[in-house]
Amino acid sequence: MARGPNDQTATPRASAPLPDFCSLPTLFALLVVGTITSCLMWLAPGGELRLRSLSVGVLYTAWLSVLLTVVLCKGRPAMQRLPGMLPYAAVWLVLMAMVGVTSVSVAWIDHNLGSGLTPASTARFVRDTLLATGLLGAALLRYFYVVAQWQVRVEAVAQAQVAALQARIRPHFLFNSMNAVAALIPVDPEAAERPLENLAELFRAALGSEGSTQGTLGEEWRLVDHYLEIETLRLGERLRVERDIDVPEALPMPRLLLQPLVENAIRHGIQPSRQGGVLRLGGRQAPGGVLLTVDNPLSDGPTTPGTGHGLRSVRERVRLHFGERATVKAEARDGRFVVTLFLPEVASARPGRR
């Protein structure tokens, strides 16, 4: 039976994201706006240019900004559950209510003390304060809304770029891994069972079977170990691995970020050489983050020219995930090719020695 228009369930509008009122930038913005407002009211024509009035006005707006930030920080989860633009309307109403209550309280205290800091008419003082707060509050909330929407769009674009890079890496990585196992099967079929298990783990990470392209540094090292076991069976004594790693394993990072670097190191540095070489994996803590290195010897034999896709994709994914502070540096040094990654720490974790 076909449904009529009245039988369809209306989908509620998505909630507009509120800014993080618990953050220092939000508090700083409120303090700056409050201070500028006090200065403009002090400089307004017809007012008395007394430093005492300016000082009290600045102190009042600063105290009100801190109090408002605390209230909005605690009430943000409840207001964020409202649909559409109602979260911002709720913030504006809370702002007006708090300013109304505090202005009445300040006027009452001032009149009882006889300080003369507020106008003789309490109603006029409250009216002017609410009018200025309503206009400036609406403008400030509009600014917060635009910034929040911009951040959502930037995050969406970054996630789309990461997904595109991940999709470009998967076929390249999977075909190379399958070729490595296929080369081993004619030589030693029984020994190919273990690399197939390792390959299954690598496939699981590459295909995102866990529903996320996000992992940790510890998981990334284990994926590298799976890949190295496959290559060790194929290259034998020609591939030697040295590890000097003492970094936080819980550091969040994209999956399959280090494996392309290890793959390039073996393909261009160790595989073309008759005697092979030593692949060095390093990791140490640095001020503000960690340093990871993949170090391979420069080949003395003919190599297959690469497209640079692996290193380029690593650079782009590092920049998208960690921001502009992160760096990826590749250089030839003392007969070796060294790739160094600096990743800012985004979560504290205890280092695990390998």
Image: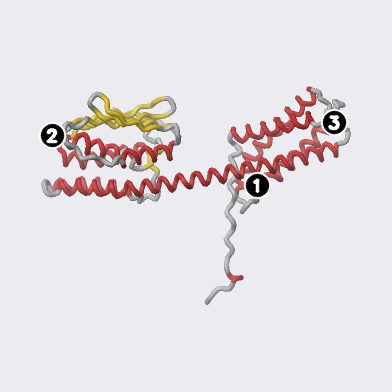
- Left or right? Give the position of 128 relative to 227: right
Residue 300 appears at what percent x and percent y?
A: 17, 31
Disc 2 vs disc 1: Cβ atoms closer than 8 Å? no
Could you tell me the amino acid type at mark 2? Arg
Residue holding disc 2 = 274
- Left or right? Give the position of 122 relative to 3: right
Q: Earlier in the sequence, mark 3 or mark 2?
A: 3
Residue 252 appears at what percent x and percent y?
A: 41, 38
Could you tell me the amino acid type at mark 3? Gly
User: Cα distance, mark 2 to mark 1?
Assistant: 68 Å
Q: Which residue is at a point 83% across and 33% down the rendered structure image?
A: 107
Q: Which mark is residue 46?
A: 3
Residue 341 falls in image quadrant: top left
89 to 43, vertically: above or below: below
Residue 146 falls in image quadrant: top right
Is disc 1 placed on a helix, strand or loop? helix
- Quarter of the figure with the C terminus: top left
Q: Nearer the viewer, residue 8 or 318?
A: 318
Q: Residues within 10 Å of mark 2 (few under 14, many from 20)?
A: few
Q: Which residue is at a point 35% across and 41% down the rendered structure image?
A: 313
Camera-nearest label, 2 or 1: 2
Could you tell me the amino acid type at mark 1? Tyr
The answer to whether residue 348 is visible is: no
Residue holding disc 1 = 88
Q: Nearer the viewer, residue 319 or 1?
A: 319
Residue 31 appears at what percent x and percent y?
A: 67, 31
Is disc 2 placed on a helix, strand or loop? loop
User: Cα distance, mark 3 to mark 2?
Assistant: 90 Å
Is disc 3 placed on a helix, strand or loop? loop
